[in-house]
Amino acid sequence: GNSVTQMEGPVTLSEEAFLTINCTYTATGYPSLFWYVQYPGEGLQLLLKATKADDKGSNKGFEATYRKETTSFHLEKGSVQVSDSAVYFCALSDRNNQGGKLIFGQGTELSVKP
Amino acid sequence: ETGVTQSPTHLIKTRGQQVTLRCSSQSGHNTVSWYQQALGQGPQFIFQYYREEENGRGNFPPRFSGLQFPNYSSELNVNALELDDSALYLCASSLLGGSGNTIYFGEGSWLTVV
């Protein structure tokens, strides 16, 4: 079945460091891919998405490129801030489903120190 | 702000009791999904409702049930609560048949079963 695997956390970085959180997926067909962020005590917020191969999603300085050849959707940011501290979830959606059912990775906790 | 609202935000129930959680979808969305997020885990898909009918279900027992109303709001009901049901329950709304395949989450309802 479909699945998502993320790098384990926690990831601890200093402010202004470069961030990479790895995400790989297994899916039949051509899923849509997402990154969601969850701040402490809150629900999930959509960070970015990509719906087809080679698409790049971007938002708030974060980027991720849909790589079909490596089945990956790694999250990157050039310079992290303390306010980026949160848990990040990679997810996929079966395109045929057109929304609703997402399969999530286990989440990667990011802690950014001043 | 996603436009998806959930209530209550926190509640405590005793093992064996029943609970009802409520969700108001984002305006214009016709599909609602429910997820269970245990502490330190990624969200797990419970089920999805479209046009007041269940439209897909994850690996959850029948004591998890739901309703969708004509105004697209929704309820999640859990009977015979077990300690392992303690989790954050997330509601998500989307537009089935629309473009973009974006799913928006509410802030969640924290359920503690004692």
Image (cartoon, coloured by chain):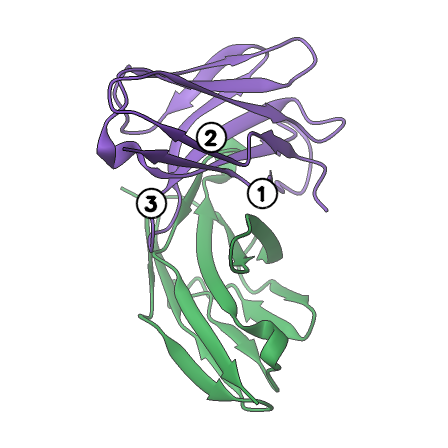
Q: Mark 1: which amino acid?
A: Glu
Picture colour for chain B: purple
Are the residues flagged by discs 1 and 2 from a single subunit?
A: yes
Picture colour for chain A: green
Badge 1, how many Cα within 10 Å: few under 14, some, many 20+?
Answer: many
Residue depicted at x 76% and y 28%:
B27
The chain holding disc 1 is B
Q: Is residue B64 left or right of residue B102?
A: left
Residue designated by label 3: B38
Counting from the top left corner in percent of width and height, residue B73 is at 63, 19
Most extreme residue toward the right is: B27
Residue depicted at x 60% and y 91%:
A16
The chain holding disc 3 is B
Image depth: mark 3 or mark 2 in front: 3
Are the residues flagged by discs 3 and 1 from a single subunit?
A: yes
Q: Tag on residue B93?
A: none
Residue designated by label 1: B107
Q: Secondary structure at mark 2?
A: strand
Dot placed on the residue nearer the N-terminal end, 1 or 2: 2
